[in-house]
Amino acid sequence: MVASAADAPAPGRKRRFRDLLPRVLSALVLAPLALAALWYGFPWIDLLAAIAAPLMAGEWLRLSRGRLTVRVLGFVYIGAALLALLWLRHQPILGRETVLWLMVCVWATDIGAYFVGSSVGGAKLAPTISPGKTWSGLIGGMCWAAVASAAAGLLFGQGETWTLALIGAVLGVVSQLGDLMKSHAKRRAGVKDSGRLIPGHGGILDRVDGLIAVLVVVALARLAFGGQWPWA
């Protein structure tokens, strides 16, 4: 929902910050709706997932461009993320807190990487996939995610601060990998955005690519750790 951090355009600092305005305005409208659905849970979060599923699938159809193996894998990936969202949110203990924590980590990654990458610049992270991404942006996003993760743990009274900070930094990397995967798909499809649904943001996949990756990874980790990670 927030400006994708490492997608900052390469040419010119002025342009980078000018492009931020429509993204922020859209986020101010959409973020409260998403947070309200998350906060109140059933049936609102389920309704949000039901609405998002066909829209995201339609965007992936556009990006996959008839490549049947790629297309199927994308549908599985999107479906797994939505199921992970609902499964994590509907956990009887700390379900709401867990998903809020994940969203905070992803948003912190995006914001930190955007501003650090725009201000510091430097070596490109993946120039052939997403020329605007830099190593400084990745490190900045990881640091912001670490702080946000630790702060969320303190707010919810759960988890060890340093452990959560480390997990937050790792999730920052996962979020950026999700962003790069989508950027690669867009580059192969020859399009700038996955869709045009959100002014200044493109499509839904443009905004939740990092969150999709994080949801899948955290859900798998919770299953591996007996449903307790990261709060136990």
Image (cartoon, rainbow, N blue to C red):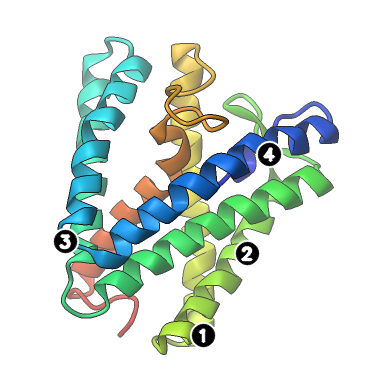
Quadrant where the C terminus lies? Answer: bottom left
What amino acid is labelled 2 in the image?
A: Trp
What amino acid is labelled 4 in the image?
A: Leu
Residue drawn at x 49%, y 27% is 202
Q: Nearer the viewer, mark 3 or mark 2?
A: 3
Q: CA distance from mark 3 to mark 2?
A: 31 Å
Crowding at dot 2, Cα within 10 Å, few <14 / some 14-19 / many 20+, comes out as: many
Q: Nearer the viewer, mark 3 or mark 1?
A: 3
Query: Is residue 122 something that shows in the picture?
Result: yes
| Label 2: element kind | helix
Residue 27 location (% of width, % of height): 53, 46
Residue ID for mark 3: 42
Residue ID for mark 1: 161
Q: CA distance from mark 3 to mark 1?
A: 30 Å
On the rendered structure, is 29 left or right of 117?
left
Q: Earlier in the sequence, mark 2 or mark 4?
A: 4
Crowding at dot 3, Cα within 10 Å, few <14 / some 14-19 / many 20+, comes out as: some
Q: CA distance from mark 1 to mark 4?
A: 32 Å
Residue drawn at x 25%, y 55% is 85
Q: Earlier in the sequence, mark 2 or mark 1?
A: 2
Residue ID for mark 2: 144
What amino acid is labelled 3 in the image?
A: Phe
Residue drawn at x 49%, y 39% is 179
Residue drawn at x 31%, y 66% is 39
Q: Earlier in the sequence, mark 3 or mark 1?
A: 3
| Label 1: element kind | helix
Viewer-side residue, 156 vs 73: 156
Residue ID for mark 4: 20
On the rendered structure, is 95 left or right of 209?
left
